[in-house]
Image (spheres, rainbow, N blue to C red):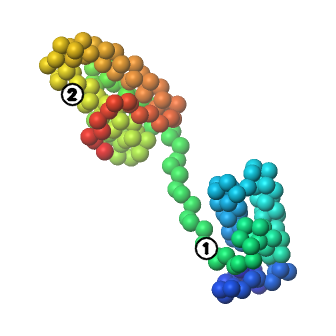
Amino acid sequence: MTAMAGVSNPVGPGQVPPAHLRVTNQDREHVVEHVKAAYAEGRFDKLEFDERLERAMTARTHGDLMPIMTELYGTRVVPFRPLPPPKRQEAAADSSERLGASAAHLLALVGFPIAGPLILMLTGGKTSPYIRRHAVEALNFQLTVLGATLLLPITVIGVLLVPVIWVAAFVLSIAGGISALSENQFRYPLTIRMVK
């Protein structure tokens, strides 16, 4: 990639930019991506990775970047690939979202095991992905507990397991509520996830 008057022009296939030309931020990022990929493949140790990363980020000319690429690929020309667009990160949940997500888990403790998460999913979940994620997880767990409560008493062992399941559901609902308040992900174990 060559830079003339601040404008990047692509270098043709098989051509290497002149060493004296200044690099753009995109040129540096291109080399950094190759260095990261080589480190991920185990081609460098941490010290070598840090050293090459430092050289790439402080490069001023193509002559500074070329030795790094030569160390990676020899003398063959590596075609320029545009960087992938940055991944969209979900914004941090505000206090009302954390409270709503926590309520989706904790309403089971006050007698609304199915209705509580369902209402939160249908109301707050429409505007907040955070509330929806926690409400769906709580709803699926409570539906699984309800199914186990109805089906397990058919067997003698099942009758003995139902109180254990209820105690576990109580404890896990508290853990889910606390997790939602502290803005962490929470997955209930042994849950059939029917609602997506």
Residue 87's x, y, as percent? 54, 57
For the point 31% across and 15% down, the residue is 164
The quarter of the picture where residue 188 lies is top left
Mark 1: few, some, or many residues within 10 Å (few <14, many ≥20)?
A: few
Residue 88's x, y, as percent? 52, 56
Q: Which label's residue is closer to the chain start, 2 or 1?
A: 1
The quarter of the picture where residue 187 lies is top left
Q: Which residue is mark 1?
A: 81
Residue 18's x, y, as percent? 81, 83
Disc 2 element:
helix
Mark 2: few, some, or many residues within 10 Å (few <14, many ≥20)?
A: few
Q: Which residue is mark 2?
A: 147
Judge whether 159 appears above or below 147 on screen. above
Q: Nearer the viewer, residue 101 or 166?
A: 166
Judge whether 32 appears above or below 130 on screen. below
Residue type at mark 2 is Gly
For the point 39% across and 36% down, the residue is 134
Residue type at mark 1 is Arg
- Residue at the far left: name it: 154
Does residue 119 appear anywhere in the picture? no
Residue 145's x, y, as percent? 27, 25
C-alpha distance separating marks 2 and 1: 52 Å
